[in-house]
Amino acid sequence: MIPNLPDFGRGSLVVLGLVLVLTLKFVKAYYEKSKLDHIATVGPNGLLSSYVTAFRWITNATDIIEEGYRLYPGGIFKIPTIDGWQVVVNGTKLVEDIKQASEEQLSNLDATNEILQTRYTMHPELAPNPYHIDVIRTPLTRNIGARFADIHHEVQKVISEKIPVTDDWIEIHTHDTVLDIVVRAVNCFFVGLPLCRNPDWCDLNIKFTMNVVFNSMIINLFPKFTHPVVGRIFTGRKSAMRRAIRHLEPIIQERLKMQEQFGKEWVDKPNDFIQWSMDAEQDAPLSQRTSVEDLCIRVLAANFAAVHTTSAFTYALYHLASRPELAEPLRKEVQTTVEREGWTKVSMVQMRLLDSFLKESERLNGVGATGLPRKVLQDFTFSNGTTVPAGTMISASAWGLQRDDEIYPNGNEFNPYRFYEMRSHDGEGIKHQLVTPTSEWLTFGQGRHACPGRFFASAELKVLMAHVLLNYDVKFPNDSREFPPLFKFLNNVGPNQTATVLFRKRKAD
């Protein structure tokens, strides 16, 4: 507050502040560029002219990445973005270099924390000990089978509520409806009943996810030394934490009481993410595992990761609506498998055509123009001889690689049978399934940093799609077969957020 200055004075200070920020950004860009002069640039290379590409990046990142992939095959290039220079690698060989590098050389954790500004958008204690990642990797994954019936039941209930089963076609706003469905299904696994059905809890997790993405992008527009100030302005984490504590504190306190009274095991001990986190003795000290605030942020962070399944489910519905003839073979596989195995984790694994359909949908669309973000902590030399200096943000050209005709013939076309056919070859059954990271498939990351929740995401996606296939017919309004334009902003790629899809009760075959 500057109460005694006239309007002109306050306005001048605002302008002066903006000029100072822009000047510092300019100096930073000049310094970064001088260290990266040996790396090719996509677009104009001048300090000022490069901002043409930086502004293009805001809405056309995929075009820029595609251009770099075409111009520098198997090589490395740099692109100017609004918040600094980014280095991008092309081809499977350089992807393998990233995969093989240690965390001390190329840090996934540092890159993620910088991109998401987790200290300000989530919680200061999240990054120093991200033990929730180990909880997702081990006890959560191990319990998918044990909790699958609960997940399936909640999927049935929430979809029937959000998409009524009627004989007439009803028009559904896809993106928002899918968000509501996914957050309910996910939280059935994370916090259980009745909280997973609480509208305020679901709204909290949806808004928390959106705020983290939006606020981190805003914070990253400012110089690093301003982040302690800017980060406190552009954050909703404290209000989110208050809401989370209101919902979770009674649950956590009751479990701590039971634990104190009966020890590690007691009758009807819950089997969910909260409890797995409280029991993670090898991953976190007792002070964290008994802290209401710490457990709350772990649950919110897990939701942040899981709610992004929304994009994959929405893509799949759009592809099904644009190609209604695919419903019959997919439905046949689901029906046959469920009749043989029931609704189980095992039956989901056996749905090979559905797996191929979902993977192809994700391959063609994805969640970003680039993938495998890393922060270079030590000067790093790639196998092609290019050295990238410490302090640089690097990533891989996901958009270019996953549409490469030499890797995926007719790579710009949607072929739901692509991975189904690839898996039919001897020894290829595991390599080309949705959950298996390879140097040609970057969606779930690579190596030790592969997404720990990918097995849950796959099972969740399949049960959602299987339920839709067995109970609904799906199409676009006016029988359109056109896939809705993708949402693109900076590096982010997502499904169209305004498109609608028509649903009706499945007609007898």
Image: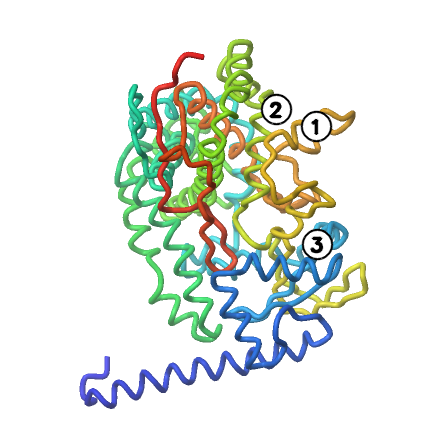
Give the amino acid at mark 1.
Arg
Residue located at (69% from left, 58% from top): 70
**Label 1 environment density (alpha carbons within 10 Å; few <14, some 14–19, many ≥20):** some
**Residue under the point 41% across and 70% down:** 228
In this view of the protein, can residue 256 be seen by the observer? no
The one of 497 and 5 positioned closer to us in this rendering: 497
Residue 22 % position (x, y): 45, 81
- Residue 414 located left or right of residue 121: right
Q: In the drawing, does residue 386 fall left or right of residue 126?
A: right
On screen, residue 223 versus residue 66, left or right, reads: left
- Residue at image mark 1: 423
Q: Position of residue 163 (x, y in %)?
A: 32, 28
Label 2 or label 3, whichever lies nearer to me, is: 2
**Mark 2 nearby-residue class (10 Å; few <14, some 14–19, many ≥20):** many
Q: Secondary structure at mark 2?
A: helix
Gap between marks 1 and 2, in whole Å? 9 Å
